[in-house]
Image (spheres, helix red, strand yellow):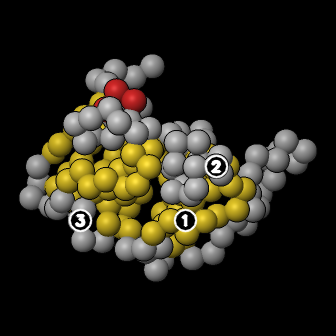
Amino acid sequence: MWTRNYNRPNTLEKIMDGVKQVSVSDEIYMVIKENNELWGWGSNKRGQLLLDSTIKYSDEPVKIMDKVKHVVTASTRVYVVKTNGDLLAWGSNFLGLLGDGTDDDAHEPKKILDGVKSIERFGDNIFVIKENGELWGWGTNYNS
């Protein structure tokens, strides 16, 4: 599987087949396959891969869930839009960045909103467009 290979930098490598979307942060790699399965690898320090808490990193992709339309990653958290429009988030909730109104880390997916069309991340800011055209957002309101 593809990881940072310092012995062969800048080498073109095939990573996976059947992928329709990818989201990458500095610690985690997530893909949605054409069959709407979410797969990921990299850091699990904050439960980003939904693996046992004793597993801190995976070099190999692990299947995380089905029926995913879109994924956005940050180094310590994950946001997914399911095919039914539910927005789920999990991982580190530093400064309430999961959007659930708490600052408690989530080791399982938490439903944040329903009726979601799309989601984007810019730094520590999250923006969601709902199916009805409403724009929702949360985050630190600054970027470094």
Q: Amino acid at mark 2?
A: Thr
Which residue is denoted by mark 2 in the rendering? 54
Q: Nearer the viewer, residue 108 or 29?
A: 108
Answer left or right for 38 relative to 102.
Answer: right
* Residue 46 locus on image (x, y percent): 52, 42
Mark 2–mark 3 distance (CA, rounded to whole Å): 32 Å
Seen at 11% across and 54% down, the residue is 133
Mark 3–mark 1 distance (CA, rounded to whole Å): 19 Å
Seen at 75% across and 62% down, the residue is 1
Q: Which disc number belongs to residue 39?
A: 1
Residue 141 vs 126, above or below: the answer is above
Q: Residues within 10 Å of mark 2 (few under 14, many from 20)?
A: few
Q: Amino acid at mark 1?
A: Trp
Q: Nearer the viewer, residue 18 or 83?
A: 83
Tag 3's secondary structure? loop
Q: Earlier in the sequence, mark 1 or mark 2?
A: 1
Mark 2 or 3, which is nearer the eye? 2
Q: Residues within 10 Å of mark 1 (few under 14, many from 20)?
A: many
Q: Earlier in the sequence, mark 2 or mark 3?
A: 2
User: Does residue 14 appear anywhere in the picture?
Assistant: yes
Tag 2 and tag 3, C-beta contact below 8 Å: no
Q: Nearer the viewer, residue 63 or 107?
A: 107
Q: Amino acid at mark 3?
A: Gly
Which residue is denoted by mark 3 in the rendering? 85
Residue 114 vs 136, above or below: the answer is below
